[in-house]
Amino acid sequence: MSINHPNFGMIADNRVIIFDTTLRDGEQSPGFSMNLDEKLRMAEALAELGVDVIEAGFPIASIGDFESVQHIAQSIRGPVITGLARSGRDDILRAAEAVKPAERKRIHTFISTSPLHMKYKLRMEPDAVLEAVGRSVALARDFTDDVEWSAEDGSRTEPDFLCRCVEAAIKAGATTINIPDTVGYSVPEDIARIFTMLRTRVPGADGVIFSTHNHNDLGLAVANTLAAVGAGARQIECTINGIGERAGNAALEEVVMAIRTRHDAVPFNNGIDSPKILRTSKLLAAITGFDVQPNKAIVGRNAFAHESGIHQDGVLKNAATYEIMTPESVGWQKTSLVLGKHSGRAAFRDKLRSLGYGEVGDNALNDAFRRFKDLADRKKLVYDEDITALFDETVVREQSRIKFISLQVWSGSKAQPRAVLELEVDGVLHEHESLGDGPVDATFNAIRAIAPHEAELRLFTVGAVTEGTDAQARCGVRLEEGGKLVDGQGADTDTIVAAARAYVHALNKLMVKRARTEPAALSA
Ligand code: KIV
Ligand code: ZN
């Protein structure tokens, strides 16, 4: 059986739609917030990767969210662009306005249906919820033929009531029905049972796409997703690197490669260009400053590394002995020395293109190229990861009110650490000397003296971009002001300079956030 969908036309029964929610559910997790440019870059990468639907944000949540969804709707061609909305009129109008410029648009509206959520979160009677389902979907249909309805906490919803809600949504015109495992409580058997029940019991079920959306609280998000597909779901909601609320969502790369590698057991197709998976994963890590853990399936540094002699010997004789898919099929290549200090501007521009940055403006290119030459002088080997870290820094610098200029630090076991810092604030150069309990503390004190602020430091992290003692350090700084969190990242061969850059980055983000008003609180 195949379905005629308003945005996709006839969909073959063995085709699964990949719905990416990295920019909405993923971005909702603490520390993963992205600014407009970062979201646009991610959206471009997702379109190139071949996702079918991009959930670009939650337009009523903030002006920033609205603008990102609208810009993505204006500029990204290919995938359907959707924005999330609760069941209220204002939410739906805001989402409709944000996705309006899209070539292909969808409104995704949801309401909680479980007894727990209805009673304590919504404080609504089931009949009122049922009425809201029909009303919200019908309103959304005034703006687009492609409407998705979600039953928040659907997997913990009483089965008869879930059937009635789904029936109401279909009658009101929903074209996709999504049943989230919002709190990651289900096991695969539960999920399969729910989809089988809905598809057999609800009138009109054969004319809509069923969708699955699984959180990873018990580490079962991918298994639950595959179980849903086995029971008839044909849309998979997922995120790059599995980011998302709490323990995250089903990881796109894991679901896609499970389907591809075990096509015998999961015989479905999708439009993902799998060799682009790794670079999309790395772009997200570079933007958010959170690397995936080394043993992360598909995209972790160790995912294709063979340590034991027995395994290495087997792989050398025949890679299939210990590799169930080729590293190249998800974008891993032999580590390459990308550029040297004699490389020219054209090669550098080319490298940026191959790393997924597209056409780079002259200012950003010149600045990044200067920094690359400087790095190549200090560091023996310059890898793709170094270029990514360096270029992300450059983009941040270009758009910032506060710019890092220089830092000199004296520290050691005998004297109190001292930092002399130069920052440019709104075009004016400032210098300050500070003492501290350590070199990082002295540096952060100097930043606070030049750019006074109330925000509290909540998290400071240090990692390495590549390996070796000459590797660039990547630092992360989380600041909190009035309940708002911002995260900044910085990279440099000098760890203290990387820390200073990260702090300045976070501060710049905070100023952007302050400049925006936040009209409504999130509830999803
Ligand atoms: O997890 C969830 O229930 C959600 C819905 C809003 C789709 O993210
Ligand atoms: Zn979710």
Image (tube, rainbow, N blue to C red):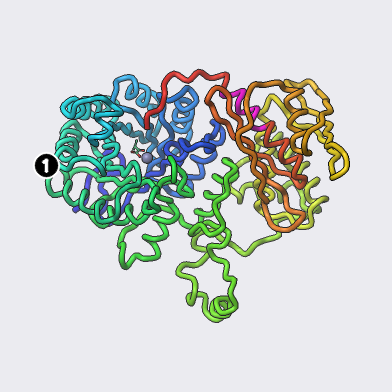
- 512 within the magenta span: yes
Counting from the top left corner in percent of width and height, residue 241 is at 48, 49
Residue furthest to the right? 414
Query: In what quadrant does ligand 1 lie?
Result: top left
Left or right side of 523 for 492: right
Total number of numbered discs in the rendering: 1
Observer able to see residue 40? no
Tell me the residue that label 1 is attached to: 203
Nearer the observer, 238 or 10: 238
Residue found at x 19% / y 39%: 162
Label 1: how many Cα within 10 Å (few below 14, some 14–19, many 20+): some
Q: In the displayed structure, would residue 351 be above or below residue 507?
A: below
Q: In the displayed structure, would residue 320 be above or below residue 380?
A: below
Mark 1 element type: loop
Nearer the observer, 15 or 385: 385
Q: Where the C terminus falls, by quadrant?
A: top left
Most common secondary structure along the magenta stretch: helix
Counting from the top left corner in percent of width and height, residue 307 is at 59, 71
Counting from the top left corner in percent of width and height, residue 45 is at 51, 44
What amino acid is found at the position of numbered circle 1 in the picture?
Pro
Residue found at x 76% / y 42%: 371
Counting from the top left corner in percent of width and height, residue 373 is at 79, 47
Residue furthest to the front? 414
Left or right side of 466 for 186: left
Observer able to see residue 102? yes
Residue found at x 58% / y 59%: 301
Query: On the image, which quarter does residue 402 sit in?
Result: top right
Q: Magenta residues? A: 505-513
Q: In the displayed structure, would residue 151 be above or below residue 272?
A: above
